[in-house]
Image (cartoon, helix red, strand yellow):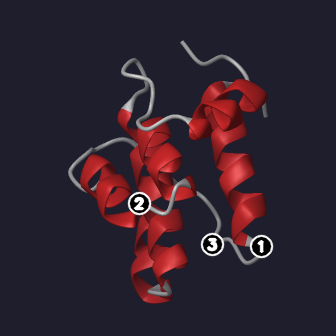
Amino acid sequence: MVVSLAEFKASLAGAAPAPDLDAPLAALWWAAKGGWDEAHKLVQDEDTAESAWVHAYLHRVEGDLGNAGYWYRRAGKPVAAGALETEWQGIASALLGSA
């Protein structure tokens, strides 16, 4: 199991996310690799706040800020406005329990 942000980032050198990652973390993994479609498929039908947060981030990456706003509300999170990389790291840290 991936336990730190550094290990999670190091896993990006692989061809696929670790099989034991939950949907939100696996989606962040794919997002970091430029696999928006793969990432979106993982969280679009999940009904958790964590998946909604990643879903919001993905729509922000896409540039669909209206849709992103909806998903931030579903996640109970404020709409992000900073750098996408900063947001990615913040979400990953929080989901890994190291925020």
Q: Are marks 1 and 3 in contact (CB under 8 Å)?
A: no
Left or right: residue 94 versus residue 59 is right
Q: Residue 8 carries which label?
A: none
Q: Where is residue 67 in the image (x, y as percent from the top left)?
A: 39, 80
Residue drawn at (31%, 64%) of the image: 37
Amino acid type for the residue under numbered disc 2: Gly
Q: Measuring from the top left, give residue 54's x and y in whole percent.
A: 48, 54
Q: Which of 62 and 51 is in front in this view?
A: 62
- Disc 1 marks which amino acid? Ala
What separation in Å lies between label 1 and label 2 (alpha carbons)?
19 Å
Which residue is depicted at the point 59% across and 40% down? 12
Query: Which comes sooner in the sequence, label 1 or label 2?
Result: 2
Q: Which amino acid does label 3 sit on?
A: Val
Query: How far is mark 2 from mark 3, CA to CA?
Result: 22 Å
Q: Is 5 above or below relative to 59?
A: above
Which residue: 41% across, 36% down?
16
Q: Mark 2 points at which residue?
A: 35
Q: Report crowding for label 1: few under 14, some 14 to 19, many 20 or more residues within 10 A (C-alpha).
A: few
Q: Quadrant of the N terminus?
A: top right
Between label 2 and label 3, give the one nearer the viewer: 2
Q: Mark 1 points at which residue?
A: 83
Residue 6 appears left or right of 67: right
